[in-house]
Image (tube, coloured by chain):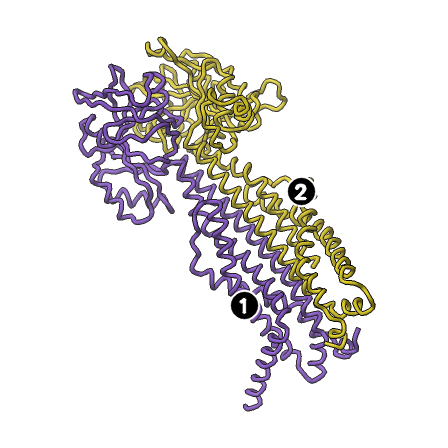
Chain colours: A yellow, B purple
Amino acid sequence: MFISVAMGTALASSLITISLEIGSKIAKELRAYGANIIVEPLLEGFSEMAGQVRYLREDDIPKVKTIFWRHNITGIAPFLETRVRTGVGTIPFVGTWFEKVIPIPGERTPFQAGVKGVFPWWYVDGEWPSDSSSGSVLVGYILAERLGMRKGDNINLAGRDFRISGILSTGGKEEEEVFGSLSDVQGVAGLEGKVSAVFVSALTTPMEPFAYKDPRTMSKAEYEKWYCTGYVTSISKQVEEVFHGGRARPIWPVAEAEGRVLERLKFGVWLLTAFTLIASALGVSTTMLSSILRRREEIALMKAIGADRVRIGMLFLTEAILIGIGGGLAGYLVSIEATYLIGLKVFGTAFPSRVGLLFIALFSSVSISILGSIVPLRKIYEIRPAFVLRGG
Amino acid sequence: MRGEAEGRRWFFYFVRMSLLQRRLRIGVACLAVIVGVGLSSALITISLGIRERLGEELKAYGANMMIIQREGGYLNEEDIPLLNRVGGRIENPQAQLYGQATIGGRTVELIGVDIEPSTGMRLYGDIPSYGEAMAGTILQDRLRLSIGSVIELTSEGRRGSFRISGFFERGGPEDKAIIVRLKDAQRILGLDKGVSAILLRGKGNLESLRRDIEGLIPYSKVKTLRQVAEAEASLLEKVEFLMALVSIVVLFAVVLSIGSTMNATLLERRREIGLMKALGGTKGSIRNLFLAEALFIGGLGGIVGLPVGVVVAEIVSKGAFGRLVGVPWHLPIISILLGIFLGFSSSLLPLRGAIRLEPAITLRGE
């Protein structure tokens, strides 16, 4: 019985740990789909009509890590798109951060930003250029084929020679562009301190129906709830607030699918947990029943010398509770190890063990032993001493 | 010869009587096996089906492959049915035509596509029907459009007026574009049957699918949209692995739990075993007797556990993904074998201990 309870508790508390953490683990995995928020310069009125080009300030970027939901920001990648003349026509020359460590105002640990983290499917044959003004660039795979260039070659962009450190394949339009470090491109284009778009990767809470409402039409309570929940729209709003003249929008295919996948997986694991709890209670029930059957003679003897059913029941229930506590403790310890291993194997990072879970584990183990004992205990009533003691 | 047949008859008689007379205890052991088999077969069903179910959800991330014309021109709409020949490996092929048109002297991107309600965009209003258009939210702001307003699209002398049926936001450059039905776009752009790209979701090995499609449609080039394809592959792999590990842990726990039940039932029969031995039963014959019982319990538990597991799996799948999960054809075999395995493995160890005991000790009484 002890083993049944311990196993039941271990299963249940492992699954509870997994279901508590699976959301954030899978959310991190889903960040592999790329950024879910894009910030672009806002153009309005006459300037927009005149076809002006505006930029965002590079200085504003680190402030993204100072918003209320700063810990949910997992990646930032700025882009500065320019077109440069070369011997073979005009080609897009894009500046970005590849893997840049930026200091965050008010934080001791710096933040690692750049496309390497935000767009994990970018594949470079060769080496990533450094983020300083290094003079090396990545050339998109299709463009490189068209120009007949290979890594290690030099390419002349706007009168300056750059070394091709690698060939970039992404499966998208980036394969027809040249990527240099942001400071190089700013220098070439004469746009110091400017960027044309910033991609932000953020862990978000799945959207609820009300969150789709225009914030301007929300009631005060709704607005507060919306602003203080990590919805993709509210994080966008907060990101937008740190940029001068910026407009942040969710990238909907990414943001929306993420919410749905997360909700469903979480719900699935919860259901599994519930079934495991029921199964453990049944398991305990069968063990309890068999232990009562085994001790029929003992019970019959107790009855024969005058113990009433309630007393005998209490005896068994106390036993069940003690076993529940012991089994719960053992199960909790087993579950820590099990979830640690599962987390490490599947996601590369362990599921954190929570002390609070110990109480949940104990509670569930005691309740499964009590619940599992209810049916077997009724059997005690049916034991007739004369019949049993006669010899079975 | 005759003695052997007689012995066999007695063997089955013993098993039958033992099962019949100890119905409650057998029921308890069976219940333990049923719970174990039910839980494990539910987990197996869910883990095997999760790739497909989760794949459905990941559809919202959009296409993972794109067919374009090799020379950068247009594909012929009439070639699309050729895609049926690759069978069920593709889903949701969607033809799109891109071009430029002007609205009141301003050039805008025009996308011709017959969109479906759930294509990874926020939609405000209705999907356009013929003669209607849907504007991106940035364009909406720029042109100060509202639902019901009429715009005139022109391209090289061809013109058409469209009623705005709604707006969309995707979070990409498309938000500055206008979407009309594919046929309308072909008319405005003067490209009868022309298609710029076919977006689709490929399943399974994308690389071999790519080669097959390129062989089927002349002048086509297939690009794998790595952003979606790679993230999806790694996510599905992880979730499957997670489910597999959870199943293993559950199975392990189930074996232990059934083992303890079996142990308890065997312990109380030590006297019986002692009596058998005293009456001249060999260790082998006693073991066979009990293993036959375990076989029966395990088999019965497996048979009853199967529907239990299927029901649990369907409830979880229906609840989490809104759809039923397919039961793998080999599940009945697995669950019965699992039941027998559980029955056997959990009684072997306690049985060994019980048989080894000297009859004199067990029969003396406690």
Tell me the element at label 1.
helix
Rendered view: B283 above or below B174:
below
Q: Between marks 2 and 1, how big is the CA–CA gap?
A: 37 Å
Residue that label 1 marks: B300
Judge the density around disc 1: few (<14), some (14-19), many (≥20) Cα neighbours within 10 Å. Answer: many
The residue sitting at 40% across, 21% down in the picture is A94
Q: Quadrant of residue A140?
A: top left
Q: Residue B355 location, x and y as percent?
A: 69, 74
Q: Residue A217 location, x and y as percent?
A: 46, 21
Please give the chain letter of the residue carrying mark 2: A
Q: Which mark is residue A63?
A: none
Q: Residue A333 location, x and y as percent?
A: 69, 48
Q: Nearer the viewer, residue B366 or A179?
A: B366
Q: Nearer the viewer, residue B120 or A72?
A: B120
Looking at the image, residue B144 sits to the left or right of residue A304; the answer is left
Judge the density around disc 2: few (<14), some (14-19), many (≥20) Cα neighbours within 10 Å. Answer: some
Q: Are marks 2 and 1 in contact (CB under 8 Å)?
A: no
Please give the chain letter of the residue carrying mark 1: B
The residue sitting at 52% across, 32% down in the picture is A205
The residue sitting at 66% across, 54% down in the picture is A371
